Image (tube, helix red, strand yellow):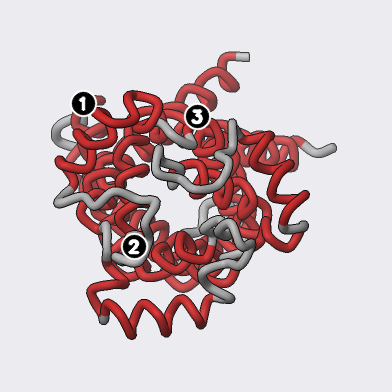
Amino acid sequence: MSAAFQSEGQWQWESATAGAVAGFATVAAMHPLDVVRTRFQVNDGRVFNLPTYKNTAHAVFTIARIEGLRGLYAGFFPAVLGSTVSWGLYFFLYSRAKQRYSKNREEKLSPGLHLASAAEAGALVGLCTNPIWLVKTRLQLQTPLHQTQPYSGLYDALRTILKEEGWSALYRGIVPGLFLQVSHGAIQFTAYEELRKFVVDFKSKKSEKTPESADKLLVDYAILGASSKLAAILLSYPFQVGIHFSGQRPGNDGIPRYMDTWHVVKETARFEGFRGFYKGITPNLLKNVPAASITFVVYENVLKLLKLARRND
């Protein structure tokens, strides 16, 4: 095995490890807002097993008062598992795609190739992790008002879904899920890479006169992560609403509220209009914009530590 091949392989696994650590840190910090976002998205006024929340703060206090800390962290384990696997796999596949599209490691990719790399990684991650996200959504939607026997956790949810609904149920919402993974990731990572390239070029010229401190670099990563995430959320948010509607558990009669993705789109447009596709965007922004800052700050620093450890070996 050549030294160059070994180096490329190590770099990709370092990206995967840094991505996994970043994913875990993000979920641990921001999960309660994810619960609120999910409940807002599926509450169309026709669901009777979800309380009505006035706004994000009211939702957080209501869940804490009625369901306790457990309610705010409903679906935490599948969220941690899904985020850790997703980010680790995403960064690994994204770095491989970038390496494949570039003729050599020193060549900078165009925005179009960054877009293609991110879209490719997003599609593969979506196919691998959809069952985890489906379980997370269902656990987050369980409340004391729930009419069906609640799932006790990840394993019980998977076992019950397979028993009652079959394998195909684990891939409910896969169409909007793939659209979300591809479009969201492509927008976010292309924006991040292009902004990062601009900042690095600008800072490299500036650092010839004044060396850049580590604290300033952390601020740069945080701003870049937040900016790229904001663009991705605003452009791809309706797909998230489609996923969470599609992933709801059937009622006691065993009949799903929505037959497929197109049914979700028609019913949402019919009863709620354009605003229905952006329900829950406030807690989503409150969660994901700072979460993206955490993700990329952790990712860049873990990657730097891994590279430093490799050089010292």
Tell me the tag on residue 215.
1
Secondary structure beneath disc 2?
Answer: helix
The quarter of the image holding the C terminus is top right
Taking 127 as reference, is 234 left or right? left
How far is the residue under mark 1 from the one under mark 2? 26 Å
Residue tagged by mark 3?
A: 21
How far is the residue under mark 2 from the one under mark 3? 22 Å
- Residue 121 lies in what quarter of the image? bottom right
Front-lying residue, 120 or 252: 252
Front-lying residue, 43 or 233: 43
Looking at the image, is mark 1 or mark 2 nearer the viewer? 2
- Residue 63 lies in what quarter of the image? top left
Q: What residue is rendered at 68% in x and 60% in y? A: 169
Under mark 2, the amino acid is: Ala
How far is the residue under mark 3 from the one under mark 1? 20 Å
Q: What residue is rendered at 36% in x and 70% in y? A: 238
Q: What residue is rendered at 29% in x and 65% in y? A: 45
Residue tagged by mark 2?
A: 232
Looking at the image, is mark 3 or mark 1 nearer the viewer? 3
Callout 2 crowding tier (Cα within 10 Å): few <14, some 14–19, many ≥20? many
Please say whether residue 199 is visible from this viewpoint.
Answer: no
Under mark 3, the amino acid is: Val
Secondary structure beneath disc 1?
Answer: helix
- Where is residue 8? Give x, y as percent: 67, 42
Residue furthest to the top = 313
